[in-house]
Every structure is written in structure tokens, then in C-alpha cells.
Image (spheres, grey):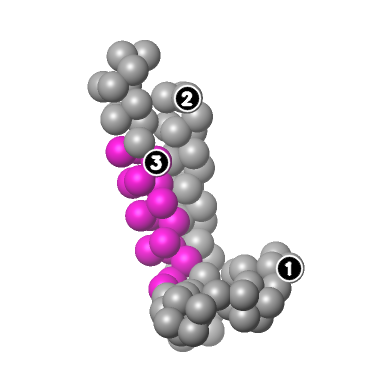
Amino acid sequence: MHTLFKSSGLISWIACLLTLAYQGVSWVLTASWPTITMMDTLSRIGIDLTSLIQSLPLEYAVKTAYVLSTTELAIALWWLGAAFFALALVNKVVFKN
């Protein structure tokens, strides 16, 4: 499990760097920084967000829509990687693997 968490963290951080590289190249070529939000990404990979949000209570639906539409993908991937590395550390300390 420790290796799985470390690998997932590394993959998340590599994806973060690739996202930032894409945004940087786009900025050099078009002179505008493209914002890639989590909602854009989830919509492009085929996850239907409207049905997901409709199944939530109103308070959580509004909060979820706000977070998904304002959080940039690179930031989310960086924090996801940090969370996976923290889980790997906790797993190593608790289970002594």
C-alpha cells in the first residue's frame, strides 16, 4: 500500500507539471494564460456533472459547483499528490512497512 500511495503521489505531481507546461506553452504562443478548471477537465473526460450535482442536497451542490468551477487543475493535482505522500508516510509509520 505504501508503494501505491507513493506512486499515486508521483503521478499526480507529474500530471501537475504537465498541466503547467501546457499552460506555459500556450501562454508563450497566444500571450494568454489558459485557465483549466477541474470542471472543464471532468466534462472533457465524460463525467456528467449535472446529474452528480442534482443528486446532492442544495447546500452541497452549490459548494461542489463552486469548488469545481474555481479550482485550477494544477493546484488540485499538487494537493492530491501531497495527500498521497502524506498517506504513504502515515501508512509507513502505522503499519511499519
Label 1 and label 2: CA atoms lie apart by: 29 Å
What crowding class fits label 3: few (fewer than 14 Cα within 10 Å), some (14-19), or many (20 or more)? many
Which labelled disc corresponds to residue 1? 2
The residue at the point 58 percent across, 77 percent down is 53
Label 2 and label 3: CA atoms lie apart by: 11 Å
Instruction: Identify the magenta region.
Output: 71-86
Local SS, label 3: helix
Let me know if residue 45 appears in the view: yes
The amino acid at mark 1 is: Gly
* Circles 3 and 1 in contact, beta carbons < 8 Å: no
- The answer to whether 32 is drawn above or below residue 90 in the figure is below
Which labelled disc corresponds to residue 46? 1
Let me know if residue 35 appears in the view: no
Q: Earlier in the sequence, mark 2 or mark 3?
A: 2
Which labelled disc corresponds to residue 84? 3
The residue at the point 42 percent across, 61 percent down is 76
The residue at the point 35 percent across, 36 percent down is 87
Local SS, label 2: loop
Q: Is 55 on the left-hand or right-hand side of 92?
A: right
Nearer-the-camera pick, 66 or 77: 66
The amino acid at mark 3 is: Phe
Q: Residue 11 at what x, y percent from top left?
A: 50, 42
Q: Main secondary structure of the magenta part?
A: helix
Local SS, label 1: loop
What crowding class fits label 2: few (fewer than 14 Cα within 10 Å), some (14-19), or many (20 or more)? few
Position of the C terminus by quadrant: top left
